[in-house]
Image (cartoon, rainbow, N blue to C red):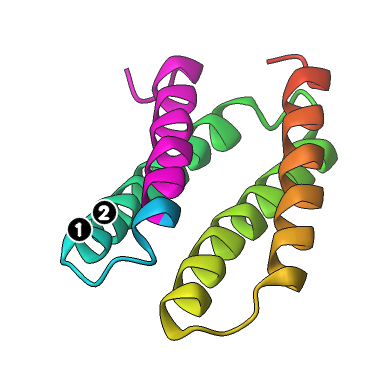
Amino acid sequence: MMESTHAHITAWVIALILFLVALGLSKSTGKGFKITHMILRLFYLLIILTGALLFFKFQTLDPALYGVKMLLGFVVIAMFEMILVKLSKGKPTTVFWILLLLSLGATIYLGFKLPL
């Protein structure tokens, strides 16, 4: 099950939804933001685990592009985290949003371009 693209896609779709929920809760002072952020971090681990399993299983198809896609995926996760942490501290996030949009777009493009 963990070696299928379904588990990986489900994990990152849920993570994207949780990220948007956490963004909405970032201005509130309750515990909802912290709980959502911690659940999102769990999904980061699931994304990395399922992505690593897919990478090691299918890297022989095109190792360079799959490696680039994996690195871009790490950048997307890092930007999710940086945006939420900076927002919770009240600091500017413009650069992180630009990096997130560029890396997310490139990752999705490679995801559709690669054979798997």
**Residue 60 versus residue 115 in the image, above or below:** below
Disc nearest the viewer among 2 and 1:
1
> Where does the magenta region start and end?
1-22
Q: Which residue is mark 1?
A: 32
Asked whether, in this view, residue 48 is left or right of residue 94, the answer is: left
Rounded to the nearest whole Å, what is the CA distance between mark 2 and mark 1? 6 Å
Q: Nearer the viewer, residue 70 or 81?
A: 81
**Residue 68 versus residue 77 in the image, above or below:** above
Q: Which residue is mark 2?
A: 36
Q: Nearer the viewer, residue 58 or 109?
A: 109
* Image mark count: 2
Q: Rate crowding at label 2 as few (under 14), some (14 to 19) or many (20 or more) other CA atoms within 10 Å.
A: some
Residue 87 included in the magenta stretch of the image: no
The answer to whether marks 2 and 1 mark residues whose Cβ atoms lie closer than 8 Å is yes
**Residue 106 versus residue 41 in the image, above or below:** above
Identify residue type, mark 1: Gly
